[in-house]
Image (cartoon, rainbow, N blue to C red):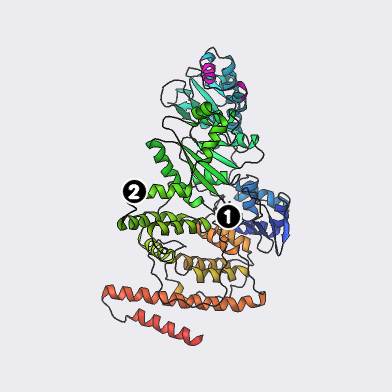
Amino acid sequence: MAGRIPESFIDDVLARTDIVELINSRVALKKAGKNYSACCPFHHEKTPSFTVSPNKQFYYCFGCGASGNAVGFLLDYEKLDFIEALTSLAHSAGLEMPSDNLPPKENFAPIYDILEISQRYYAHELKHSPHRDKAVSYLKQRGLSGTIAKRFGLGYAPPGWDNLLNTLKNNNKSQETAITAGLIVEKSETRHYDRFRDRIIFPILDSRGRIIAFGGRVMGDEKPKYLNSPETPVFRKNEELYGLYECKQASGKLEKFLIVEGYMDVIALAQNDINYAVATLGTATSQNHLEKLFRLAPEIIFCFDGDQAGLKAANRAMEICLPSMKDGRQIKFLFLPEGEDPDSMVRQEGRELFEHRMSQSQTFTAYFFKYLSDQVDIDTIDGKARLTTLAGPYIKMLPTGVIQQLMINQLAELANLEVDLLVRLLDQQATTHKKVEPRDSAPDHEYSESYSHSDLPPDYDDVDLGTSTPPSDYQDTPPGHSFKTDPSRSLTEKTIRLLLLSPNKTASIIIPEEMLELDLPCIHLFRELILFLKAQDGVSTAAVLGHWHGTQEGLWLAEIAAKEFLLPSEHAEQEFSDALLQLRKFCIHYAIKQQIEVDRIKQSKNSSKLQALLKQKQELANSS
């Protein structure tokens, strides 16, 4: 379809690109067995956990879960969009981009230009406006110096409806562009006015230091206290953080971030040499925000007021954080005295005492169990049971790893249960309760959804390569379950790993009939993977991962592909045949159990479908 890059072209670019050479030109790699390693460029670490596979042509970090192919690396490392990244690789490979399929390139230069002119206007008004005394007095009253005001590019929008509007007209700037940039409000076809009036102005910068929006704060009790630019083609609130660019400029090596509420909090902290504070832009913290920060530092501290509104915001943040709690990361919660904010506290206490406060912040785990324990009577049996019911869906949202296991251990201790029993109870609970979902999600992007950086949970446990037989007590899982609770996961994972080892050997594979009807996500992905490989000619592992990248299926495939086989290639084909046989046995066993339940509900005995499944089971047993 028009506007889509042919997948065959993307595969060709990937096939001509050496990901080791690409990454090594930006991050120093060292040979480590068959692969290459380095300290991850997407999060702070001292011990290398970032691996690049020349065979599979993709990278994976066992610390933060970053993964992808060559396109995905440029998206995240160079901060390019999909077309820019693909064009760069195509040029290096001597290929011409298929111009007929390119989407019309959006030119945002006029928007950036008009935002830059507006920032200069606001900064000029802070120094020269007849009304400047009000703004200057306010900033001095808040304890800000001229140096810090200049560093953050503070400005002033004087009273009046068309000050900026006329300034832009005098600079021959398009009114339509000013509206698109969020600077001018269109009330009607004939009535337009400045969005920001009689407010202190805070420029909002992206990761490259470009002005993308503004925030305005009143100097009295008017409402709203803060006013932000609306979302525009260059500004998405759930992706940007105020002060992040300034943090990176001030600190060569960031150890942590403090998430606060307002612009003034960020600036007041920076003036007191606390150069790691950022603020969200009128929205709750999103997973996009968290991942952006975790790429730069391993610790995040949320700062809240100690009132009911602060507690409510903390509870919401806790839920958002769950999928991002990967091993090696720390999240903490700092509650200030009621009526205080970081701005007022740091001016009262100074840097040393304020940082001491931060050192006393509650850990994520401590806050999590306090939040849940406050809702039950933990001293009663009913309360302990209720605690496990409340905690289960949240714990299931945690990435697989040490943190999840330690939280399971702590929950078992609080509930006075054996860990193994609790795990089984949580698995059963997951099959009967709707999964808790975070309150926000990242937006879809047409050209980056398949090749962008992903949130991939680390997994250090390799899969048993030995031949296994299906257990006799599979748990039935209703539609809508996750990969984690899919009873076919271990068998399917082993089969897919062997398949990814030699993805070009699928031409002769026939998808067994018993796999066509099972509504299990792992089996469904296995079917789709077989069909995809059959439709491609000599497709690489990198192309396979790219096809599903940005999806839940892609997360699981990348996790599987990152694990190395200690298996001679000459044994891979027989091992795959054995794995496929075990998977088929499972599918028939599972289908029989489902059919027995269907027959029971319909009060039908030994239905023809059940008889056919039993016959398949016997035939498979005889053939093996």
Nearest the eye: 189 or 508: 508
Q: Is residue 19 above or below residue 354?
A: below
- Rate crowding at label 1 as few (under 14), some (14 to 19) or many (20 or more) other CA atoms within 10 Å: many
Mark on residue 375?
Answer: 2
Mark on residue 65?
Answer: 1
Nearest the eye: 123 or 473: 473
The first of marks 2 and 1 along the sequence is 1
Q: Is residue 375 above or below residue 166?
A: below
Query: In whole angstroms, how far apart are the C-alphas of marks 2 and 1?
Result: 33 Å
| Residue 160 in sight in this render | yes
Magenta stretch encompasses residue 224: no
Majority SS type along the magenta span: helix
Nearest the eye: 352 or 72: 352
The residue segment tinted magenta is 134-147
In the picture, measured across the screen, residue 507 lies left or right of residue 223, that is: right
Q: Is residue 606 above or below residue 525?
A: below
